[in-house]
Image (cartoon, rainbow, N blue to C red):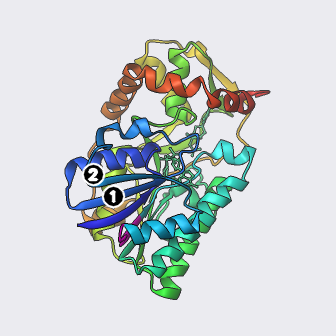
């Protein structure tokens, strides 16, 4: 049995990860430490809440005593760190909590991992640490780190710290850097769920700038399978890029959603651009493909269709979210745009 502390699993990617891995395997015991911020929702974990190999602890990864207690009580030998403040626009409105959680939180986990001699520490990172690409080229693992937003700079700082713990203390770390995810359970502040829900509610679809910024989309389960593989087989000290080579402009994504939902392009509203908006992300994932044998298994059109259908049939899930705290954020974020 592997005793793993997996953080931030009430959020989008982490909840999909636990729902997937605990269904597939019974050789892992997982403690999920999550603060339940605005982005954390225990409803996401209904399928596994009574699993005998699972415990939930509500708490903050920056809490040294709590993290220490968890390592002792559950004999933790492995860490997978999903917990983060994850939304670029929020990081532009206020950056402190991003550095607190993403940098200091990672430091608390690393220090505990060092005290308890963990056997593997997997840091879930993002392609955004590489900065922005022009019209051509791809991010490889040797692309220099050059983050542009408070969010991506906090993730880059964490990556550098994780690598420093490997070089200095011999900590057995691995880092994954994935491109933009989509799928069920994604919080509606992010592009795809926001556009689906606005369409269903008859609200305008706010596209930043000229809408020609490019993101490289991957279905969340493909990301999670790659994380599992890197956790099991990734070479200590290494970084692995994860992506499904599906570049799309934002306007293409929005039109695809409108088309699927039978609505017209008059719902689109071009609004003021995001400050410092990265133009293009695109991932070269040949390292994980060649060295670990991973490849994406979901086809973009089908997985997008499934995702849109999921939002159509889970109105209760997102209705509760958009009627609460989120409403205030939406007003501030999209006011005067
Ligand atoms: P999310 O915002 O949906 O979920 C984050 C989770 O972390 C929430 O459950 C939240 O409650 C928890 N959390 C936040 N601060 C915490 C703290 N201080 N202590 C404990 N828990 C805390 O994010 P997501 O989209 O699921 O992203 C998960 C990870 O994957 C992040 O590290 C993110 O940087 C990375 N990532 C995301 C994407 C993407 O497209 N969403 C792509 C690549 C990498
Ligand atoms: P987002 O989902 O916030 O992910 P990230 O910024 O981490 O890539 O945004 C994806 C793209 O969509 C990005 O180029 C910004 C753009 N976008 C809009 O045009 N309008 C919106 O309302 C949002 C939330 C994003």
The range drawn in magenta is: 74-79
Judged from the image, the secondary structure of the residue bearing numbered disc 1 is strand
Q: Nearer the viewer, residue 176 or 22?
A: 22
Quadrant location, the C terminus: top right
Any part of residue 144 in sight: no
Per the picture, the main secondary structure of the magenta-coloured stretch is loop
Quadrant assignment for the N terminus: bottom left
Residue under circle 2?
21
Label ID, residue 30: 1
Please say whether residue 78 is one of the residues in the magenta stretch.
Answer: yes
Residue that sits furthest to the right in the current view: 336
Residue located 35% across and 27% down the image:
305
Number of marks present in the image shown: 2
**Percent of width and height locating residue 244:** 37, 49
Q: Nearer the viewer, mark 1 or mark 2?
A: 1
Front residue of 210 and 53: 53
The image quadrant that residue 108 belongs to is bottom right
Q: Which residue is located at x 71 percent, y 29 percent?
A: 334
Q: Quadrant of residue 38?
A: top right
Residue 251, x across and y down, in percent: 55, 30
Q: Are marks 1 and 2 in contact (CB under 8 Å)?
A: yes
330 shown above or below 73: above
Q: Position of residue 80 (x, y in %)?
A: 41, 62
The kind of secondary structure element at disc 2 is helix
Q: Identify the residue at image location x=40%, y=20%.
A: 312
Residue 25: % across, % down: 20, 55
Q: Is mark 2 within 8 Å of ligand 1?
A: no
Q: CA distance from mark 1 to mark 2?
A: 10 Å
**Residue 182 drawn in magenta:** no
């Amino acid at each position: 049995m592997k005793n793993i502390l997996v953080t931030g699993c009430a959020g989008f990617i982490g909840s999909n990860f636990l729902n997937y891995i605990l269904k597939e395997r019974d050789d892992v015991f997982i403690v999920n430490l999550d603060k339940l911020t605005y982005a954390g929702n225990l409803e996401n974990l209904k399928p596994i809440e009574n699993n005998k190999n699972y415990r939930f602890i509500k708490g903050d990864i920056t809490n040294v005593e709590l993290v220490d207690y968890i390592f002792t009580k559950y004999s933790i030998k492995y860490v997978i760190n999903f917990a983060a403040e994850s939304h670029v626009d929020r990081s532009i409105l206020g950056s402190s909590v991003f550095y607190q959680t993403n940098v200091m939180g990672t430091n608390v986990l690393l220090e505990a991992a060092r005290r308890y001699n963990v056997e593997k520490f997997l840091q879930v990172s993002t392609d955004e640490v590489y900065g922005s690409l022009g019209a051509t080229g791809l991010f490889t693992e040797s692309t220099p780190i050059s983050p542009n937003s408070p969010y991506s700079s906090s993730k880059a700082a964490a990556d550098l710290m994780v690598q420093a713990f490997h070089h200095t203390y011999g900590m057995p770390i691995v880092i994954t850097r994935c491109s933009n995810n989509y799928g069920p359970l994604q919080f509606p502040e992010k592009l795809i769920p926001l556009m689906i829900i606005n369409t269903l509610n008859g609200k305008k679809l706010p596209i930043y700038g000229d809408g020609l910024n490019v993101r490289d989309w991957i279905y969340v389960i493909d990301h999670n399978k790659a994380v599992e593989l890197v956790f099991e087989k990734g070479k200590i000290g290494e970084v692995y890029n994860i992506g499904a080579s599906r570049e799309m402009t934002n306007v293409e994504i929005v039109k695809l959603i409108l088309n699927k939902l039978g609505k017209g392009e008059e719902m689109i509203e071009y609004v003021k651009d995001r400050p410092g908006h990265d133009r293009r992300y695109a991932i070269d994932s040949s390292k994980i493909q060649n060295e670990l044998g991973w490849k994406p298994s979901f086809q973009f059109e089908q997985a997008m269709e499934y995702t849109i259908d999921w939002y159509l049939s889970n109105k209760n899930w997102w209705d509760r979210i958009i009627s609460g705290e989120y409403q205030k954020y939406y007003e501030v974020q999209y006011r005067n745009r």
